[in-house]
Amino acid sequence: MSIEKCLRFKEDGFGNWDDSAKPTTPAQMYQYTKNQNNVLLQLASKCWQPGTSYSIGDVVSTSSMGGYFARCTKAGKSSDAEPTWKKDGSTTDGTVTWAVYRLVLADMLESLIAPIILKRFPVGTIIESEKNVNPGTYIGGTWELMPAGYVTISAGTYTETQDGKAVAYNFEAGETYGEAAHKLTVGESASHNHTRGNMEITGMIRVYNEFNYDNNTANTDAFKGAFYHTGNAEYPTNTNQVGGKLDGIWNVNFAASKTWTGSTSSVGGNGYHNNLQPSRAVYRFRRIS
């Protein structure tokens, strides 16, 4: 089948209807319309059409085939809606049967481009995505989904200053570090102490006792330690004759303090504190081959 030339409306002289000297004739408009229809039919013959009769050997394609084409293996009439094409298989369309094949050119292009793309992602490459889709399905190669809960950190030696001293941390590629929650040890806690405090006790009591004129030391020894006598320690503050005996009444002051030793009572829940940095969760894949 020869391909008819597509006439151009203005350039080929079919748009001169407003030219009074040489206007476009009805015959010319008919010729132009017929040409456009024939060219369109030629183009459409290679595209699948609804409700169209096809013969064995006819070849069609559509944009939905994505690099495939269909060859008619059983003549008939196509359906009113485009069928779902079974790639690399047979598709029934109304009374027509199609064999669907992949374009050789598409296969050639894919075989040439795929290795070039994959070379851009060598083994050990990590890809992040919010979609759980293995890169092997669109890049090639073998990829593994990395364990949940891990972030990445630059490999090598990191040094920082702590209390005026340089402290180095070594990170080896492929190893894992850190924890999501941590319980502090005594050595990790900030240096501190707890004051137990003391208690001061002051006041005065009045002691009534028989006064011993024969042993003033006994009178004085009665007030020792936290207790002491105001005034003359050898004689009572007041004396009374009671039952034929001379008794004494001492005003005794006291001042005492108490300092506690040992540990305070325990507080705190002994739990873990959150170590997580502000994060956004993604799926992370690593190429292994």
Image: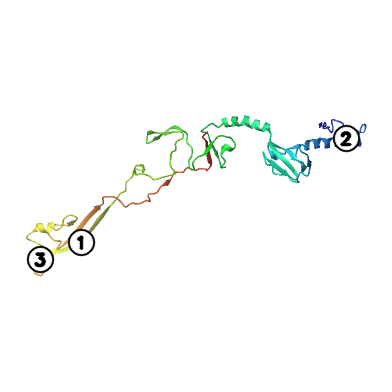
Nearer to us in this view, 74 or 274 = 74
| Quarter of image, res 13 | top right
In the image, residue 153 above or below residue 94: above
Query: Alpha carbon of mark 1 to alpha carbon of mark 2: how far?
Result: 137 Å
Circle 1: element type: strand
Q: Amino acid at mark 1?
A: Ile
**Residue at the disc numbered 3:** 246
What's the residue at 67%, 40% (across, down)?
Answer: 89
Give me the disc on residue 31.
2
N-terminal of the two: label 3 or label 2?
2
Nearest to viewer (mark 3 / mark 2): 2
Nearer to us in this view, 75 or 163 = 75
N-terminal of the two: label 1 or label 3?
1
Q: Amino acid at mark 2?
A: Gln
110 sits left or right of 6 in the view: left
Query: Alpha carbon of mark 3 to alpha carbon of mark 2: how far?
Result: 158 Å
Circle 2: element type: helix
95 sits left or right of 31 in the view: left
Position in image of residue 148 (x %, y %): 49, 43
Give me the disc on residue 205.
1
Q: Amino acid at mark 3?
A: Leu
149 sits left or right of 96 in the view: left
Position in image of residue 67 (x %, y %): 68, 36
N-terminal of the two: label 1 or label 2?
2
Q: Residues within 10 Å of mark 3 (few under 14, many from 20)?
A: some
For residue 82, say whether it is visible: no
